[in-house]
Amino acid sequence: MSFPWHEIRDHLMHSSSTFTFQRRFDAIRQAQGPLADFRDPAALLDRLHRGPGDADCKNEILTALIRSAQGGGSGSDCAVTLLFLALWPGLDAIRRRSIHRRMGACDEIAADVLARTTGAIRNLDLTRVHWIAATILRNVERDMMRAHQRETARDHLASAIDPDDVLTDPRGDDGLQADLPKIIGADALLIIRVAIEGFTQAEAAAQLGIPFEAARKRYQRAIHRLRDAIREIS
């Protein structure tokens, strides 16, 4: 069962107001110095959202929450909930931009934002990151866009090629990949990287040492050659 976006936030806010959550919050504030002055989750969130604009202080709070989120135990889930609420305005902006870009159904986009944010929180390397909120939000939106671009590339190839001409190749993917150089020449590896392995054109260009604009034009020409070859076969 899916919930509207605003109801997800309401659920998180309600969870953060329970007695059990308060006990877990007390435990992590005792373990993390930057959280010690906040008597409850509401005071902490008020400081992050509406408090004085001391960016370094707010970043220390978020860093302490990340440490708690990655520490395991009951305090971990408490910290993740607080991080979601702290980052909510930015996550909401990502969701709205993703809908505007037509990156999927609203429920799918909401689920993707939540899942990728959870992963970003759990896996953030604090030794390599300084500005917590900006890094998490940038990484979530970047990864969503990359995934959408890969899916779009796969759909583009699927629309360009009749599945009966390719997917039923009895030799499987290895046979197809072996034949591509014969059909489209030197750009076969570019096609394989983007259309089969799911890389973006920019990522494939970087791997192959090709300027992005050149890779984009070569990819388009290779797709046209592939279409022409399939028409001749059929």
Image (cartoon, grey):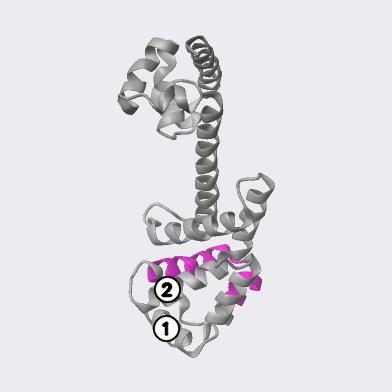
Q: Mark 2 and 1 residues: CB-CB less than 8 Å, in contact?
A: yes
Residue drawn at x 50%, y 55% as measured from the top left? 136
| Picture coordinates of residue 125, whole percent (x, y) | 38, 55
Q: Is residue 69 left or right of residue 16?
A: left
Neighbor class of circle 2 (other Cα within 10 Å; few <14, some 14-19, many 20+) is some
Q: Which residue is mark 1?
A: 24
Magenta residues (range): 45-68
Residue drawn at x 42%, y 11% as measured from the top left? 183
| Picture coordinates of residue 102, whole percent (x, y) | 65, 45
Give the answer, above or below, for where 84 lies relative to 148: below
Image quadrant assignment for residue 29? bottom left
Q: Which mark is residue 77?
A: 2
Image quadrant assignment for residue 72? bottom left
Label 1 sits on a secondary structure element that is helix
Report if residue 52 lies within the magenta region. yes
Quadrant the N terminus occupies:
bottom right
Label 2 sits on a secondary structure element that is helix
| Picture coordinates of residue 221, whole percent (x, y) | 54, 15
Q: Which mark is residue 109?
A: none
**Mark 2 → mark 1, Cα distance in angstroms:** 9 Å
Name, please, the residue furthest toward the bottom. 19
